[in-house]
Amino acid sequence: METIILASSSPRRQELLRTAGIPFVAAPTDVDETLPKEIEPHVAVLTLANKKIDAFISANQRGGCNWVLAADTLVRFNGNNIGKPKTREEADLLLQQLSGKQHTVYTAMVLYNKPLKRKIESVDVSSIKMVTLSNKDREWYLDTGEWQDVAGGYRLQGKAQYFIEELIGAPSTVIGLPLHKLYKMLAKLNYNFQD
């Protein structure tokens, strides 16, 4: 199989690719992730995933890799787009808000095939309901540090799974890379899964 450049530093996305058996090299890009607050969630994640892939392509025009993948994830709750909390206090506030309620997770992916000079994109959505969290639950979870560097302030594949009452959609979407959609995107651009 050909190696894919993953334009992301996310250990969770890297683990998903490893689990799927897709060879990759992580090459994070630095982009301004500031967007208007009113932007629709599917537009927000597509915009940021495109910014990441475009930044990588423009900085590596002579690079030898034929495949580049970028992704972005956000949580939508009560009509607001929620990114990554910057502090423990922000994470605690998010967990208080999500406690006992349903929210939606959006993940966009953009895949570029250099020989074809073709870029395709996809957005996937999953819905999650958390159990009602006590102060003790939140403090314990915050002490794990898992809230850091993740949209919504929790990691589904970590200790936060104790708090998930219902999940509708793909777990890999919540983690940050919808593998069922990625497979279709790669197949559409004739990626060779046989090697």
Image (cartoon, rainbow, N blue to C red):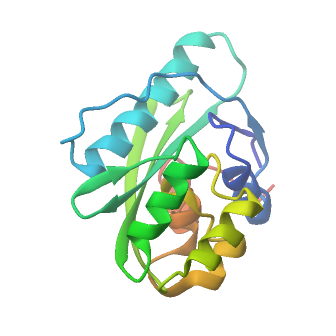
- Using the rendered image of the protein, determine whether residue 162 is visible from the camera's viewpoint: yes
Residue 171: give x, y in percent of width and height. Answer: 56, 74
- Is 18 on the left-hand or right-hand side of 140? right
Rendered residue at 38%/67% (across/down): 97
Residue at 65 percent of width and 84 percent of height: 162
The x and y percentages for residue 81 are 32, 51
Front residue of 74 and 170: 74
Residue sticking out furthest to the left? 38
Q: Is residue 137 above or below residue 91?
A: below
On-image quarter of the C terminus: bottom right
Is 155 on the left-hand or right-hand side of 80? right
**Extreme residue in the front direction:** 135
Q: Is residue 105 left or right of residue 52?
A: left
Residue drawn 51% across and 65% down? Answer: 173
Q: x, y (%) of residue 127?
A: 39, 75
Where 109 sits versus 25, above or below? below
Q: Residue at x 29, y 51 (%)?
A: 42
The x, y position of residue 193, in whole percent, is 70, 58
Report which quarter residue 44 is drawn in. Answer: top left
